[in-house]
Image: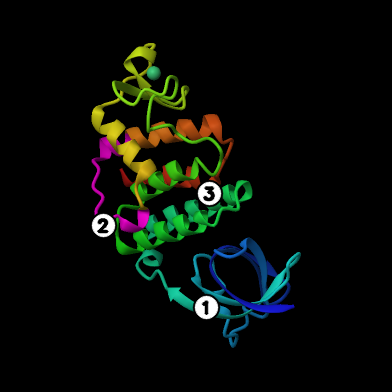
Amino acid sequence: MAVVQVEGIIVKEVMYQESSKILTLFTKEYGMIGVLARGCRSPKSKLRGVSMRLTYGIFYLSYKNNGLSTLTQVDVLNPFSHMLMDIEKISYATYLLELTEQVAKESSDPALFELFKNTLLKIEEGLDPEVLVMILEVQYLSFLGVSLCTSCCTICGNTSHIRTISVDAGGFLCDACYRGEKLYSEKFLQLIRMFSLVDIAKISKLSIQDAMKKELRDFLEYYYEKYTGLYLKSRNFLKNLKKIGS
Ligand SMILES: [Zn+2]
């Protein structure tokens, strides 16, 4: 068994035997892997505080290619201390964990890890988690093989005279291809295009009005429903959280 160091984020933890856990670790190098954190629930274990969901760090593993690797040590890279103090941020992060686990089943592209990590780091920095989640959702679509076309008209490829965007068409529609679909504002079209192109690591400010956020939310929800078949429990939890908050 080789000893390796990997950059990763714990996306899932399952109790195992008396004092251990089996972790699902999302790594830059190997994608999603199963890791045994032996004895991590016992009070004296040095793995105790670092075998939890959302732990981000360098993980030292006895790596097994086709089975459970064993965790030996973790150097935390960011403790996400602001995020973990805030129920709303944790809820969004939890949703992202679930979503990312599903997306990683469809794609082993290492870019996925970077997107996921950068989004968590931006939530930790204090940028609007609701908007960050939507940006990531748009960018994940290409890994799911159902990209949203925002570079040109999805029917004829025309890059000018864009009239609106349509879930059913899968992206932008130009004047010539428009057939009475719902109209969205210019601002909406700009934002959704920005969502698909922006480098999340470089975002320093995000401010979008609530009404616009809701419109984007509804659009993306319908898009995910129609094309991805992903049903996520935490998505419903977020909805309820929003109801309580409003
Ligand atoms: Zn067209």
Question: On the image, which quarter does residue 45 sit in?
Answer: bottom right
- Residue 114: image x %, image y %? 46, 59
Whole-Å distance between the Cαs marked 1 and 3? 24 Å
Identify the magenta region.
200-214
Quadrant of the image for the C terminus? Answer: top left
Ligand 1 image position (quadrant): top left
Say what secondary structure mark 2 lies in: loop
Q: Residue at x 35, y 35 (%)?
A: 216
Q: Are marks 3 and 2 in contact (CB under 8 Å)?
A: no
Whole-Å distance between the Cαs marked 2 and 1? 30 Å
**Dot 2, crowdedness within 10 Å: few (<14), some or many (≥20)?**
few
Q: Reading the chain from its start, which is encountered first: label 3 or label 2?
A: 3
Q: Which residue is mark 1?
A: 49
Q: Which residue is mark 2?
A: 204
Question: Does 167 appear above or below 224?
Answer: above
Question: On the image, which quarter does residue 242 sit in?
Answer: top left
- Residue 99: image x %, image y %? 53, 49
Q: Which residue is mark 3?
A: 99
Q: Are marks 1 and 3 in contact (CB under 8 Å)?
A: no
The amino acid on which the numbered mark 2 sits, given as a three-letter code, is Ser
Q: Is residue 211 magenta?
A: yes
Q: Residue at x 49, y 36 (%)?
A: 147
Say what secondary structure mark 1 lies in: helix
